[in-house]
Amino acid sequence: MDAFRRSWPHPSRSPPTHVPSPLVSVALCTCNGEAYIEAQLASVLAQTHRELELVVVDDVSNDRTVEIVEEAARRDHRIQLHRNPRRLGVNANFARAFALCRGDFIAPCDQDDVWSARKLETLMAAIGDADLAYGDSAVVDAEGRPTGLTLGGQRRMVRGQGNVALAFENTVSGHAALFRNTLLPQALPFPEGVWSDGWLAFAASQRAGVVYVDEVMVDFRRHADAQTRIGHAPRGGAPDRHQRRAREARQWLSTCAAALDAAAARPWPCREAAGALSKTLDDANAGGSTMPLWQALLRHRRALYGDGPLAALRALRLGGRILSRIRRARSQA
C-alpha cells in the first residue's frame, strides 16, 4: 500500500509537462522543377515528424513550379514560398534558404527526389550531440523506377570527427542530411567551387561530428536535368568517354583544392593539415614532384582518417587516387 501511495501523484505536484518536438526547417530550393515538385512536396508534408516548416526558395523558374508551390501552400500553412528577383545558382540559393529557416535543425531538400515518411524522425533520433546526420539513398530513374543501386553501396560512407578526407571523398548528400542551425556560422559563406552539402559535412566534422544511418531514406532521382552526375551511367563512346573522364578529373582536382584552401583559411582544427595538403596538391598538379604530397598525406593521416590502424593505408590509397586523377586530367589537356 505504501508503494502504491508513493507512486500516485501528490495533489500539490504539477503533472508532467509535454516537451514539444524541435522545429525542423526543410529548405527546398527550386528552379524549373514542375516535372517532379508535386511528388517531393507530398513526401515532405507526409513526414512523421510533424513539427516542420517547409521553406521554398525559387530561383527564377519560368515553368509552373511557383504555381504548384503556391497551390500547395494554400492547403498547408507550413509552406513558405520565397522568390529570388534574379537567379542565384545552387549554392547561393541554398544559402538564402538556410538564412530564412527558423528551426533548430535544417534539412536541405532537392526538388526532384522523394523522401521516406520517417526520414526526419529517423535522423532526429540519430543525431545525438553531433552537428549533422545523414542516411543512404536509393537511385531511381526519371520515372521513379528503382535502378537497384544505392549511394551507400558505391562508397565508404564518412562518419565521425576531424575528417579532412571529406575534401577529397565527400559522401554526404544534402538531400539525405539533417544538420543543426548552429552549424551555419561556421560553414557560411560557402566557398567558390565547392558544393554546399560537402562543405556543410566538412564543417560539421570539424565541430561535433557527423553521424551516418545505414538506412535508405530518399529516392534519389537521376534524370537529364539533374544538377550533379552522381548515380548517372556513363554516356558516349570511347573518345567522348576519355574526354569526359579528363574533364571530370580536372573538376575533381579543382574542387579538392578549393575545399582545402577554404579550410586552411578557417579557424578549424584541421587548418594546418589543410594548408599542407593544399600546397602539395597544387605543386603536384602543376607538374612538380609528388613526393611532398605523399609525405603530407602520411604526416596528416590522423587529420584525414582519425586514429584507426588503417589510417596510413587509406592515406596511401588516397595518394594513388589523386595521382591517377592528375594523370587523367593531363591526358586530354
Image (spheres, rainbow, N blue to C red):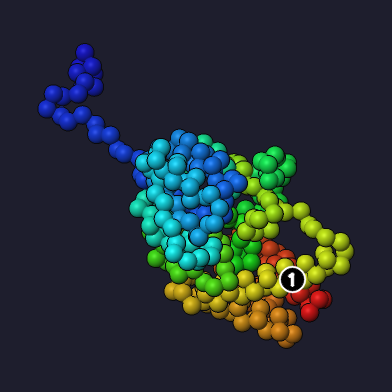
Q: Is residue 209 in sight in this rendering?
A: no
Going by the image, does 90 lie left or right of 229? left
In terms of depth relative to the viewer, which is nearer, 2 or 129?
129
| Residue 328 horizontal side relative to residue 115, left or right | right
The count of marks equals 1
Residue at the image position 21 percent from the left and 29 percent from the top: 15
Residue pictured at 52% horizontal, 74% vertical: 262
The amino acid sitting under disc 1 is Arg
- Quarter of the rendering containing residue 116: top right
The residue tagged with tag 1: helix, strand or loop?
Answer: helix
Give left or right: position of 276 versus 290.
left
**Label 1: which residue?**
247
Q: Residue furthest right?
A: 238
Residue 314 appears in the rendering: yes
User: What residue appears at the point 54 percent right and 73 percent down from the top-left corner?
Assistant: 192
The N terminus sits in image quarter: top left
